[in-house]
Amino acid sequence: MVVWLHGSSCVGCSVSLLNRISEAAPYSATELLTDTVDLVYHQTVMAQAGDPAASVLTRAYRDGGYVLVLEGGVATAFNGHACIAYSLNGEEVTFMKAVSDLSSRAAAVVCVGTCASFGGIPAAGANPTRVVGVGALTGRPVINISGCPANPDWVVWAVAQLIAGAPVDLDEDRRPTALYNRDLSGNPCEATIHGKCPRNIDVNPNALPEATDFGQDGRCLIGLGCRGPSTKARCERCWNGIAGQGTWCIGVNAPCHGCTEKTFPGPQSFYELYPL
């Protein structure tokens, strides 16, 4: 049983998951939700609303043992009232309280996206609502599936491992090593985006010279703020099971923004180097 709650975020990780297309079963989000995962609560896709929907959370908490998926950072200012997760019997429940309560009886907690993992965009800048990542709030073990948004295949992989009772090896930032620094066969590999990028002449001797300006097709953007050298992820696997360079940021001539790292979007991010 999976419970999915939303906090301070744009809900982009849910959109990413619902747009999932795969060459292997489950082939789509529809098959995932109807045939594979027992998703009992997700305010965007569930038919119920209001108290009937919130009552699902009450029953899940009572029974325990669910996989808790959290999307979005946790607003801690104003006693958490900057972000309301749901209401029940006329009482608003903050995301901060929901996370604290539900994580205490969960079999595992999965933080989907950089906001839930590390604070992300909601925690950037002045951070007036004092957003933090889930692990920083609860102090409990979590599995971080960082990314802005998170790759849907990574989310499905993590939940599937937990449901199957398979062990999940984590790196120092509590991200699965299988998703962030191993190859498709599970063997350790070059972890950084730049270290396996086909536009890096050290990786691909046939690569073109580095770009000197934006819009130069097929060229390495390291001199224009690309965060590939400091970003760990298997983005080269691409999105939605579709092979080809065009399905990741670099493939469409955009620099890596470092969105899987806990520094995103602050220090050492593309946005820090090139402010608007």
Image (cartoon, rainbow, N blue to C red):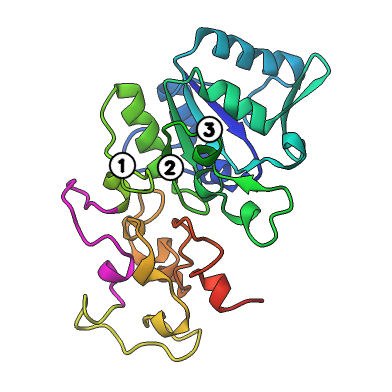
Can I make out residue 209 in this image? yes
Q: Residue 194 magenta-drawn?
A: yes
Q: Position of residue 91 (x, y in %)?
A: 80, 20
Label 1 neighbour load within 10 Å: few <14, some 14-19, many 20+? some
Residue depicted at 31% across the width and 64% down the height: 192
The amino acid type found where label 2 is placed reads: Asn
The amino acid type found where label 3 is placed reads: Thr
Q: Residue 154 magenta-drawn?
A: no
The image quarter containing residue 50 is top right
Label 2 neighbour load within 10 Å: few <14, some 14-19, many 20+? many
**Labels in figure, total:** 3
Can I make out residue 21 in this image? no
Mark before the other along the chain sequence, 3 or 2: 3
What residue did someone put label 3 on? 138
Mark before the other along the chain sequence, 3 or 1: 3
The image quarter containing residue 271 is bottom right
Q: Tag 1, which secondary structure?
A: loop
Residue depicted at 47% across the width and 78% down the height: 225
